[in-house]
Amino acid sequence: MIPIKDDAPRSTTPFVNYFLIGLNVLIFLFEYSLSTRELRLLVSHFGFVPGNVTLWAAGDVPLDVAAVPVFTSMFLHGSWLHLIFNMWALAIFWRQT
């Protein structure tokens, strides 16, 4: 089943959803403008790498190397289709019933 809308009533405007969708699109457009080398560098710094958590637990890397990508990786998307489906999931919850 593909969800089309949420049936939970709501009485406020979903400004956070608007902001997240806009931010995700802007970051994806930025990613899209990068060269392959620059994109690899961006993903290696801001994409989540589970091995970095293991290295942090062992004391080999600082906390920011393991913790920052937990938040920044949520804004990285691999393709237009990936972006569209993720933003669709956010959009489902802003629609009025």
Image (cartoon, grey):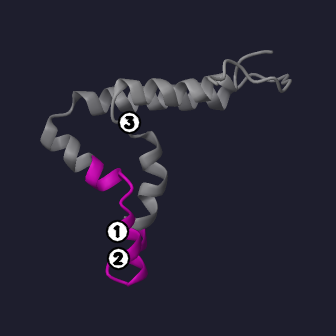
Q: Most prominent secondary structure in the magenta stretch?
A: helix
- Give the mark nearer the N terminus: 1 vs 3: 1
Query: What's drawn in magenta, residue-wise?
Result: 43-64
Q: Residue under label 1, please give it.
A: 51
From what the image shows, is residue 66 above or below residue 86? below
From what the image shows, is residue 62 above or below residue 79? below
Q: Is residue 87 magenta?
A: no
Q: Residue at x 64, y 25 (%)?
A: 1
* Horizontal side, residue 12 vs residue 85: left or right: right
Amino acid found under the numbered disc labelled 2: Leu
In three-dimensional space, the C-alpha distance between marks 3 and 2, rounded to whole angstroms, equals 25 Å
Query: Which structural element holds mark 3?
Result: loop
Q: Quadrant of residue 15?
A: top right
Q: Residue at x 23, y 27 (%)?
A: 33
Q: Residue under label 3, please give it.
A: 77
Direction bottom: furthest residue: 58
Image quarter in which the C terminus is found: top right
Location of residue 13 in the rendering, given as x and y in whole percent from the top left corner: 75, 22
* Horizontal side, residue 35 vs residue 49: left or right: left
Location of residue 72 in the rendering, given as x and y in whole percent from the top left corner: 43, 49
Amino acid found under the numbered disc labelled 3: His
